[in-house]
Image: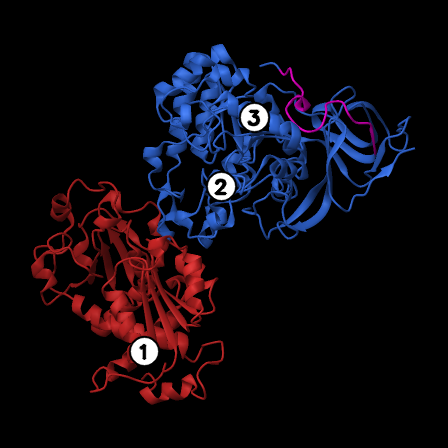
Chain colours: A red, B blue
Amino acid sequence: MRHLLSIDDLGRDDIELVCDRARSFAEVGRRDIKKVPTLRGRTIVSLFYESSTRTSSSFELAAKRLSADVVSVKAAGSSVDKGESLRDTVATLSAYEPEAMVIRSPEAGAAALVAGWTEAAVINAGDGKHEHPSQALLDVYTLIDNVGTLDGKRIWIVGDVAHSRVARSCIRAFVTMGAEVTVAGPPTLIPRGIDELGSSVSYDFGDLGGADVIYALRMQKERMKEAFVPSLREYAINYQINGRRLGPRQLVMHPGPVNRGVELSPDVIDGPASLITAQVASGLLVRMAILYEILAGSERPRPLTRVGGEGGSSEGAQIGEPA
Amino acid sequence: MTESGTIASLDWRGERGSGDLLIRGPHAFDPSEGLDRECDIVIRGGIVAEIADAGHGELPGGGEEIDAAGLHAFPAFFDPHVHLRTPGQEYREDIESGTRAAAAGGYCGIVAMANTDPVVDDPAILTALRERAEGEAVVPTGFVGTVTRGMEGRELAEMAALREAGAVAFSDDGLPISDAGVMRRALQYQHLVGGTILLHEEDPSLTGDGVMGEGAVSAALGLAGVPDVSESTMIARDGALCLYEDARAHVQHLSALASVEAVATAKAAGARLTAELTPHHLVLTDDAVRSLDARFKMNPPLRTEADRQSLIEALRSGVVDCIGTDHAPHAPHEKEVPFEVANLGVIGLETAFAALYTHLVLPGVVDLGLIVERMGSGAKLFDLAPARIAVDAEADVALVDLDAEWEAGADGWESRSANSCFTGMRLRSRPVITIVAGSVAYRRREFTMKVAG
């Protein structure tokens, strides 16, 4: 992988490669010193134009566990606040010669644009309502970890699909991995034409019982400039995943942060069906795997010029090749 | 409507009736005149004096002779929909650069929109623009006045005073006239002031945050979509208002099948409604937006292949009256940004004919004659006679090399801006010399001149 911009750029093999790599890092996390020297001396810039807890912290921690130097730039308090354009900010940060840039932007296509402006590998950590590929990869990893395979699994993605980049990346990734995906939610929050990504569409939960996994989306109040549903109360009445709606074998996922009592009831969030905490744990491993595959992986096209004598492959062997 | 004026009566730096020229040996093609043969075109005093058999034309008393062997001579084009960005946004375009781009595209006349900074809602601004055009405009240029004061859509601008100052029509283009009552009043007032009203049809409440056509592509990209009904419902409204007030209006840049149907319905009911299409809506679809390249961001947006096919059919059937480019220059810093925050619009004057010839005429989708006719017929909106190649007609001629192959943008643009949705595309055919009222308004460098005689 040269960049990670869209799940569309990945085939099933690529996704499995990342998951296998992530699994190999799980062992590192069980050591006393949870660090490997793979990316020592390399610089990774993390540029976040939107607030984030999980994604920014897990990318930063993933980079540190791989011994990279990390510079984190948040839009608030930076020259972005002073009106600097994305292009100028990227040019400025590129002067540090980073190996990778992790970028989150409120605008679709921002990461792909940045990839054209910098020598660094670009990792899309969320671009508007378009894609959030690292989230989809960690969700695939979490599912493989818990149910073995996605082949033939029925996954319902439920809620505010219209404003969700997670939904768009997850539909693509789950379909690529062989799952049957249904998106469900209020008609005002299911965009026309979404079925062309390979999912079916439902406006009610009549067939929810057939789902193996229910992936609830956050009601993105911050992205809604107008009322797409009459009230969150009415939304919860019709679409909340709660103990009454959840079947005994069904698993529940959510990308976080959760609006407790809106898309998920508290008993479900904290109950045995919930994979939410596992998703966060996977996030660290998968983001380590993404950085590894892009900066040190076997398919990396360019030679590693800035690391004297230390090839990526020898250090890959050090942490153990995937099983 | 009467077609009283000639195109060269608009403002430009040339003079009506100035030129003597001999165009030697082109294949002249003017379907409205039934002209389709190799000939010599003799021009005296800016007027076509004779269409002689090839090799037999003579220009007694001297004057320039243009060797046009191998070229086609079309009646030059007229663009009813151009943004010259003057006053106030000259970093994108000005009268000189924009009209040079028009001449390079084979146009002998254009009409400039009023959404400048300030907007053209004041006769003094319009007068100043006309004076500048007399000094700078390479081709005859008309200016519209706004329909509403400040283009705010609330109160009528001083339309009579604007008309008195020379407004060729009225338009709030760039913005719709959302309020039906205001639209109705403007149509009523037309009975006093004359001049058609050019309409950018869009219902802001349906467009919402939309930045591209609504459909599978917008859903996949996570971009808010503009539904076609945002355009078509407004067309239906204004068709009904035109009928009720017995007034005339022109729908700019149709983008959707639903809009074609709305125009057809209004026309069938007897409304004096005309309609226009852009080359980019005839050639491209929302599939191009998958790149998230803001060069494909314009308003109205690119839509589906079914929409594009309906637009082509509307061109054939006559539901659509003319082709306009909606030439909308933007600076790089306004376009080389993420799609959602990029400015709306593309330049189009220099690629219009070549794009349509390459994508519609060469594959046999649309006849050359129809393209040539519709690229000139926009003049009628302003009661001007479209260019034609005929004895005693004003000599407005586009010489086009139909065999030329070029890459759009590769050798730069005459326009000050480069935001073309065709950049990088291989195109066939290129206008090489544009003649307005017998004077050469544009000549590609490779065509040197020689003196006749």
Q: How would you rate the neighbour count of disc 1 (Cα within 10 Å): few for under 14, some for 14-19, many for 20 or more? A: some
Work out whether disc 1 and disc 2 sit on a shared chain. Answer: no
Q: Where does residue A154 sit, x and y in percent of width and height?
A: 24, 61
Question: In screen coordinates, is B453 left or right of B390?
Answer: right
Residue in the image at 34% along x and 78% along y: A68
Question: In screen coordinates, is A135 left or right of B235?
Answer: left
Residues drawn in magenta: B3-23
Secondary-structure class at tag 2: loop
Question: In screen coordinates, is B74 left or right of B345?
Answer: right
Q: Which mark is residue B12?
A: none
Q: Chain of mark 1?
A: A
Q: Where does residue B137 sit, x and y in percent of width and height?
A: 64, 32
Select label 1 or label 3 by which is in front.
3
| C-alpha gap between disc 2 and disc 3 | 26 Å
| C-alpha gap between disc 1 and disc 2 | 46 Å
Q: Amino acid at mark 3?
A: Ala
Q: Chain of mark 2?
A: B
Q: Which label's residue is closer to the chain start, 2 or 3?
A: 3
Residue in the image at 88% along x and 28% along y: B59
Query: In the rendered structure, are the residues bearing label 1 and label 3 in contact, judged by CB atoms less than 8 Å apart?
Result: no
Q: Is residue A28 magenta?
A: no
Select label 2 or label 3 by which is in front.
3
Is residue B271 among the parts visible in the rendering?
no
Q: Which residue is mark 1?
A: A20
Query: In the rendered structure, are the residues bearing label 1 and label 2 in contact, judged by CB atoms less than 8 Å apart?
Result: no
Q: Chain of mark 3?
A: B
Image quarter of the N terminus of chain B = top right
Q: Which residue is mark 3?
A: B128
Q: Is residue A220 above or below residue B238?
A: below
Q: How would you rate the neighbour count of disc 2 (Cα within 10 Å): few for under 14, some for 14-19, many for 20 or more? A: many
Q: Is residue B201 above or below residue A261?
A: above
